[in-house]
Image (cartoon, rainbow, N blue to C red):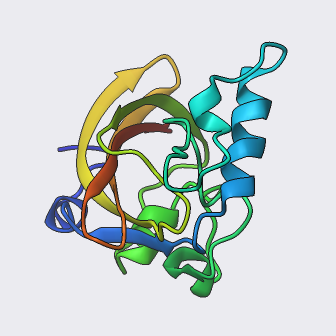
Amino acid sequence: MSALLTPALEAVVGGEVRRRTSYPVGATEIRRWAVAVSWPAAPPAYYLDADPAALVAPGDFNPFAWAAPEDTLAARGLNIGDPGWIEKVLDVEPPAVSHQLNGAVEDEYLAPVRPGDVITSRTTLAGYKERTGRLGPMLITTLADTWTNQAGAVVKRASMTLIRH
């Protein structure tokens, strides 16, 4: 019998744990982000283009860095610092863990973000695995995050792994 992975947890795999919708992306935000992530070098010209129609954001641009007007996690009074936040969102008993750490993040950039885009992020619980480490049982939790723009085009896919014990 698993120490942390219960049938109730396995039953909620695939459930949505967070949804955020950004404010419309501004040209100035794109330019500031490009300058910041390129520092001390100058960013490529296509990140600074004066013509908003030609301007694209760097792949790692985060439209949620400042705030999201719609965030289902914040609306429930939860935060990702709580080791049981995923299960609390899905209305199941959280595993008996008190610590969590980032195990990995993999990003795939599929379409550029442009001024005026409104990005929606939908994060789902992709799966669980249980392992035993030096500190005892660990619950390896994988989340899948898909970003789409207002036209429904997928902008980014991310896979995040949390290690909880």
Identify the residue at horizontal 59%, vertical 86% (top origin).
75
Residue at image x 55%, y 71%? 22
Question: Does residue 154 appear left or right of residue 150 in this picture?
Answer: left
Q: Position of residue 17 (x, y in %)?
A: 38, 68
View extreme (top): residue: 41
Res 99 quadrant in image:
top right
Give the quarter of the figure containing the N terminus.
Answer: top left
Q: Can the viewer see residue 144 in this picture?
A: no
Q: Is residue 148 visible to the viewer in this orientation of the structure?
A: yes
Quadrant assignment, res 124: bottom left
On the image, the x and y values in percent for residue 48 come to 68, 38
In depth, the one of 22 and 162 nearer the eye is: 22
Say which of 95 and 34 sits in front.
34
Q: Nearer the viewer, residue 11 or 36?
A: 36
Give left or right: position of 18 versus 78: left
Relative to 13, is 158 above or below? above
Spot occupied by residue 131 in the image (x, y as percentages of width and height): 31, 27
Tag count in the figure?
0
Q: Report which quarter residue 108 is drawn in.
A: top left
Vertical comparison of 155 with 78: above or below: above
- Residue furthest toward the front? 51
Q: Residue furthest bottom?
A: 75
Which residue is pictured at 58% across the width and 44% down the height?
61
Residue beneath the point at 36% across and 73% down: 150
